Amino acid sequence: MKPSKEPLLTALDIATRTSELADTISTDYTGRELLLLPVLKGGLIFAADLMRLIKVPLTLDFIRARSYQGTRSQGGVEFLVHPTEPIEGRHLLIVEDIVDTGRTTAAILDLLQAEKPATISLCTLLDKPASRQANVEPNYAGFQIADHFVVGYGLDYNERYRELPAIHILEEE
Ligand code: IMP
């Protein structure tokens, strides 16, 4: 498998849309302070670009979660990295690379909600609404894409291709 020669989204497409999202977020959070929580590893690059364009004060921390198959059929999610910042009373903005089935994100939102934040919102660069299985609706979404497997700009295939500046569809060799 390898990334398509032509990108699905160019670095310029991503930068332009990221700037629009940052403007909307800055307007929505005027007068408030954000706790930005990128979901590792995929959300790192998007969050690094987004945070430099947001115009309200913010604090940065990280989440890393892993899905596991529990004894019940639906499995669950556990934190591998939990924010060290206090969550209670804060305005959380979760930053994801992609919401696909939405299961991981739904579980992360549930776990954080239990820690009593003031508000919690979800910003994702990519949204694949056709594959949704959990009840998750991003508050901010960069691009809706069809059900392709994509790599680049933080997104990996077996840990490769995160460093590509654009987003490519993964194709057969
Ligand atoms: P979920 O299905 O929404 O729970 O997605 C969980 C995780 O799967 C995402 O945060 C990504 O890390 C990964 N993922 C889903 N779709 C893609 C893709 O097209 N490319 C790379 N990673 C993906």
Image (tube, grey):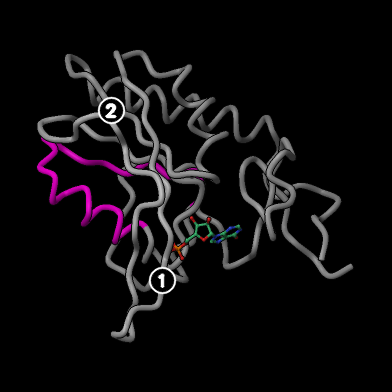
Q: Quadrant of the N terminus?
A: bottom right
Residue drawn at point x = 49 percent, y = 44 percent:
40
Q: Quadrant of the C terminus?
A: bottom right
Answer few, some or many: residues within 10 Å of disc 1's Cα (few below 14, many 20 plus, some between 14 and 19).
few
Q: Looking at the rendering, which quadrant does residue 15 occupy?
A: top right
Q: Nearer the viewer, mark 1 or mark 2?
A: 1
Q: Amino acid at mark 2?
A: Leu
Q: Amino acid at mark 1?
A: Tyr
- The span shown in magenta is 105-126
- Report, in whole angstroms, how far the alpha carbon at label 1 lies from the one at label 2: 27 Å
Residue drawn at point x = 49 percent, y = 52 percent:
98
Residue drawn at point x = 31 percent, y = 18 percent:
58
**Above or below, 56 relative to 42:** above
Image location of residue 159, percent across then percent down:
68, 53
The one of 70 and 167 positioned closer to us in this rendering: 70
Q: Is residue 90 left or right of 141 when viewed as pictured?
A: left
Q: Is residue 29 magenta?
A: no
Answer few, some or many: residues within 10 Å of disc 2's Cα (few below 14, many 20 plus, some between 14 and 19).
many
Q: Is residue 7 left or right of 45 when viewed as pictured?
A: right
Query: For mark 2, what is the residue?
Result: 35
The one of 91 and 82 positioned closer to us in this rendering: 82
Image location of residue 158, percent across then percent down:
69, 60
Image location of residue 42, percent across then percent down:
55, 46
Q: Is residue 91 left or right of 25 when viewed as pictured?
A: left
- Circle 1: element type: strand
Q: Looking at the image, do the residues carrying marks 1 and 2 touch, with CB atoms under 8 Å apart?
A: no
Residue drawn at point x = 32 percent, y = 44 percent:
122
Instruction: Work out whether mark 1 precedes mark 2 in sequence or the reverse, and give the earlier one.
Output: 2
Q: Is residue 107 magenta?
A: yes
**Above or below, 136 relative to 9:** below
Query: For mark 1, what is the residue?
Result: 68
